[in-house]
């Protein structure tokens, strides 16, 4: 069973609009509330993902392509009614990308890919359920 230690740290500064959120090795961000009626975020986040390539004429067996990327940049989110609208931009760096047979070890791969750092823009729309975020005021 793989084990990965996680270190977390969250701190709100004396100015309550600023906070730092660190979850190592996943992210380290500095966030400011009430920036143009929304949230401004600056920092770096680590993402890992993968997809399966099933049997085909070129590949004998089932393969999986796994990749790990580092996103560094700035983001803005704003609540508009029940919608949370966001935009994030910066640079994406691929740390590792490998094609390997399903159930094989990560170091037993068919090929790996090398990608350059590229700019990115991510736009998002999420549904927020305000009843879940109401404060109890006594």
Image (cartoon, rainbow, N blue to C red):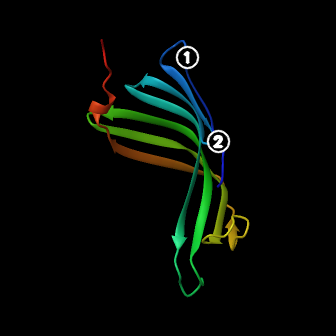
The residue positioned 53% from the left and 70% from the top of the image is 52
Query: In this orientation, which residue lies closer to the viewer: 1 or 5?
Result: 1
The residue positioned 53% from the left and 49% from the top of the image is 120
Q: Is residue 118 above or below residue 38?
A: below
Q: Quadrant of residue 86?
A: top left
Residue farthest to the bottom, as pictured:
57
The location of residue 27, given as percent across then percent down, is: 59, 39
Q: Is residue 18 above or below residue 115?
A: above
Q: Which mark is residue 13?
A: 1
Compared across the picture, whether 37 is left or right of 115 comes to left
| Quadrant where the image shows the N terminus | bottom right
- Mark 2 lies on a secondary structure that is loop
The residue positioned 73% from the left and 65% from the top of the image is 107
Q: Is residue 20 above or below residue 126?
A: above
The location of residue 55, given as percent across then percent down, is: 53, 82
Query: In this orientation, which residue lies closer to the viewer: 69 or 92?
Result: 69
Compared across the picture, whether 32 is left or right of 80 comes to right
For the residue carrying disc 1, how many other residues have a C-alpha within 10 Å: few (<14), some (14-19), or many (20+)?
few
Distance from disc 2 to disc 1, alpha carbons, whole Å, reads: 22 Å
For the residue carrying disc 2, how many other residues have a C-alpha within 10 Å: few (<14), some (14-19), or many (20+)?
some
Residue farthest to the front, as pictured:
1
The location of residue 106, given as percent across then percent down, is: 69, 64
Residue at mark 2: 25
Pair 2/1: label in front: 2
Q: Quadrant of residue 22?
A: top right
User: Which tag, 2 or 1, sits closer to the chain's start?
Assistant: 1
């Amino acid at each position: 069973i793989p084990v990965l230690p996680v270190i977390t740290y969250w701190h709100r500064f004396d100015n309550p609009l600023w906070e730092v959120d660190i979850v190592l090795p996943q992210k380290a961000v500095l966030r400011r509330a009430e920036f143009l009626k929304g949230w401004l975020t600056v920092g770096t986040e680590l993402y890992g993902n993968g997809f399966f390539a099933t049997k085909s004429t070129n590949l004998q067996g089932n393969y999986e392509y796994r990749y790990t990327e580092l996103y560094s940049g700035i983001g803005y989110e704003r609540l508009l009614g029940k919608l949370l609208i966001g935009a994030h931009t910066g640079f994406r760096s691929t740390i590792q990308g490998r094609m390997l047979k399903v159930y094989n070890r990560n170091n037993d791969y068919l090929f790996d890919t090398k990608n350059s750092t590229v700019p990115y823009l991510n736009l998002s729309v999420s549904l927020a359920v305000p009843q879940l975020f109401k404060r109890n005021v006594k």
